Image: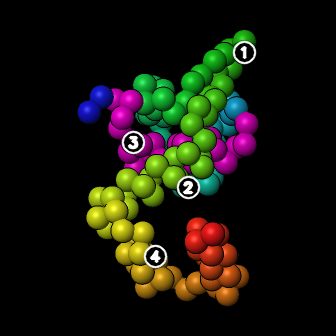
């Protein structure tokens, strides 16, 4: 498997989530602060730089400079990542069965009536 096909490591997920939550390109210094505030992770600057280098090789981010400030830009959207994550994990853990994923979801968390309605609507739309 080449590096572009690899997903995010556990630590890289915190970094990527902070980038996505910024909703726009984020300055490196602001990213450090956001990761610490949002997730309680106090990574060294060099550690974050290494994560970003790996994430760039995987096609998740790019970076650029304006003056002396480095900015990070998300290449893959959070929605794209979540869809691929669900697909990969459904295939790996549930043998590709969406029904088993749904059963596991229903067994592991309280589902609100609003969520049930949304699920029903989505399922009904699939039948049409």
The verdict on residue 22 being magenta is yes
Residue 54 image offset from top left, x and y in percent = 41, 29
| Residue that carries the numbered disc 1 in the rendered image | 66
Which residue is farthest left? 1
Residue 99 image offset from top left, x and y in percent = 41, 75
Give the position of the N terminus as an image quadrant.
Answer: top left
**In screen coordinates, is 3 left or right of 124?**
left
Which quadrant of the structure image shows residue 128? bottom right
Name which residue lies at 53% across and 43% down: 15
| Residue that carries the numbered disc 2 in the rendered image | 39
Find out whether the residues at labels 3 and 4 contact each other: C-beta distance under 8 Å: no
Residue 74 image offset from top left, x and y in percent = 61, 34
Find out whether the residues at labels 1 and 3 contact each other: C-beta distance under 8 Å: no
Name which residue lies at 72% across and 15% down: 66
Viewer-nearest residue: 88 or 120? 120
Up/down of 43 relative to 92, above or below: above
| Residue that carries the numbered disc 4 in the rendered image | 102
How many circles with numbers are drawn on the protein? 4
Q: The magenta stretch spans which residues?
A: 3-24
Q: In terms of sequence position, does the residue under pointer 1 or pointer 4 come before the other?
A: 1
User: Circle 1 — which element?
Assistant: strand
Find out whether the residues at labels 3 and 2 contact each other: C-beta distance under 8 Å: no
**In screen coordinates, is 91 left or right of 75?**
left
Report how far apart the C-alphas of labels 3 and 4 lie in the structure: 23 Å
Q: In terms of sequence position, does the residue under pointer 3 or pointer 4 come before the other?
A: 3
> Which of label 3 and label 4 is nearer to you?
4
> Which of label 1 and label 3 is nearer to you?
3
| Label drawn at residue 113 | none
Viewer-nearest residue: 78 or 116? 116
User: Circle 4 — which element?
Assistant: helix
């Amino acid at each position: 498997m080449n590096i572009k096909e690899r997903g995010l490591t556990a630590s890289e997920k915190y970094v990527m989530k902070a980038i996505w939550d910024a909703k726009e390109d984020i300055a490196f210094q602001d990213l450090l602060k956001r990761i610490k505030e949002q997730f309680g992770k106090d990574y060294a600057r060099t550690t974050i730089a290494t994560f970003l280098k790996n994430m760039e090789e995987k096609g998740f981010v790019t970076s650029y400079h304006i003056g002396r400030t480095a900015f990070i830009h998300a290449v893959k959207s959070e929605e794209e990542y979540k869809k691929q994550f669900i697909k990969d994990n459904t295939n790996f853990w549930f043998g590709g069965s969406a029904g088993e994923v749904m059963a596991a979801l229903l067994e592991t968390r309280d589902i609100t009536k609003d969520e049930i309605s949304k699920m029903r609507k989505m399922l009904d739309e699939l039948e049409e």
